[in-house]
Image (cartoon, rainbow, N blue to C red):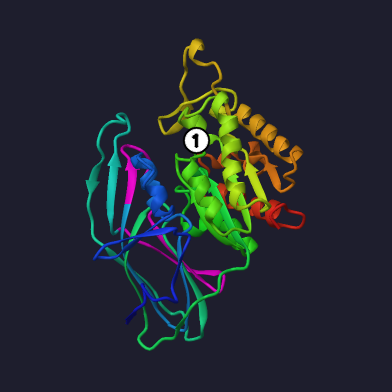
Amino acid sequence: MQSILEHEAVRLVGALSVSRWESGIMPRRLPEWALAQIADPMFRWVVSNASGVRLVFSTDSDVVEIEAKLTGAEIEGTAQPPAPRFDLVIDGEVRATQTTTAGALWVLSANDRNASPTLRDGDAGTIRFDGLGGAMKRVEVWLPQARRVELRDLRIDDGAALAAAAPLPVRWVHYGSSISHCAEADGPTATWPAVAARAADVELTSLGFAGQCHLDQCVARTIRDLPADVISAKLGINVINGDSMRERAFQPALHGFIDTVRDGHPRTPLLLITPILYPAGEDHPGPSILRRGVSAVVDRPDELAFGALTIGRVREIMAVVVDQRRRAGDANVHLLDGRTLFGEGDLGDLPDGLHPNTAGYRRMGERFAATAFGAGGVLR
């Protein structure tokens, strides 16, 4: 078989930088200059997770084969994450999926945040898709969304034709938290941004960073500099989870984030999405912890609660900010209540009280595609 991993016809879509070693390449979802500004090891970790990243090309090969080493992470004593899955999309349709048990795993302590993770090392694996036929076709290989993926090789049949596949005409950049990263989904095309992007036939760049959506300026500047026809940002939950901002900081930080994005995209449609339903934090400030596998918020003395944010208050502040921007003349900034994507009637698909399951993510993607990209949608 012929190796095509570094061929100019193969695009690594959704990756904004690539780390290179003698053994292979690893996509990352922020540029190098932004990574240099990130000290938090968990932020750096989720940037290296391949949510929304895919290999895109055209070929008439009957076989597509990927060699990769995957590295995952899990919290000791919690439910096992789904087996990492590669999804093969041919001419816009999911043709096949392959899971693998090969790779390494970092194990984090459930009770001691200061404890160093332990590594269960593993080997690279080979993922093979065959029986694809001899006609020329657009191929997308979506990489596992909750794994760091070191690509060792990408192969097609000897003598098979290879050509670049044109980008989709609408470029969508989305920023969010774990509820946009979607580690809990069964596979990479089952994340809600992927479901929405494929339904609307738009080219997705997913900046969904589990636990790390805190209006960081390096992310705002990244979005500012990216080519984008439409932009969305689902905000608020990590500010509550980490208790990283109080009311005094959140509103100007949100304005500042929008200002930075607008420096590069002064008139691009920008949709801000408030948090989905979060029962534990709707009227109670964070931070949050896991109790017996379910998200819960921590009680605090009254004297430490002044200005602390609840999910309900975050929604109110976001509505105020959007109203202020529109009154100031920005008619292309919009607001979507996240509960229209996942609300009271969906709680049966919120197993840990915070993250939807695959069925919940699918509905979120379908609803977002209809609301934002459908007839009359603000991102249409």
Would you say residue 93 sits in the magenta stretch? yes
Residue drawn at (64%, 30%) of the image: 317
- Percent position of residue 3, x then y: 33, 78
Q: Is residue 145 left or right of residue 126?
A: right
Residue drawn at (43%, 52%) of the image: 30
Q: Residue furthest front?
A: 263
- Percent position of residue 246, x then y: 53, 25
Residue 123 sits in quarter = bottom left
Residue indicated by mark 1: 238
- Percent position of residue 89, x then y: 50, 69
Closest to the observer: 179 or 308?
A: 308
Q: Is residue 64 left or right of residue 355?
A: left
Q: Is residue 254 above or below residue 281?
A: below
Q: Quadrant of the N terminus?
A: bottom left
- As helix, strand or loop, the secondary structure at mark 1 comes to helix
Would you say residue 283 sits in the magenta stretch? no
Question: Bounds of the magenta span?
Answer: 72-101
**Looking at the image, can residue 274 be seen?**
yes
Residue drawn at (57%, 38%) of the image: 256
**Looking at the image, can residue 81 be seen?**
no
Q: Is residue 27 above or below residue 317?
A: below
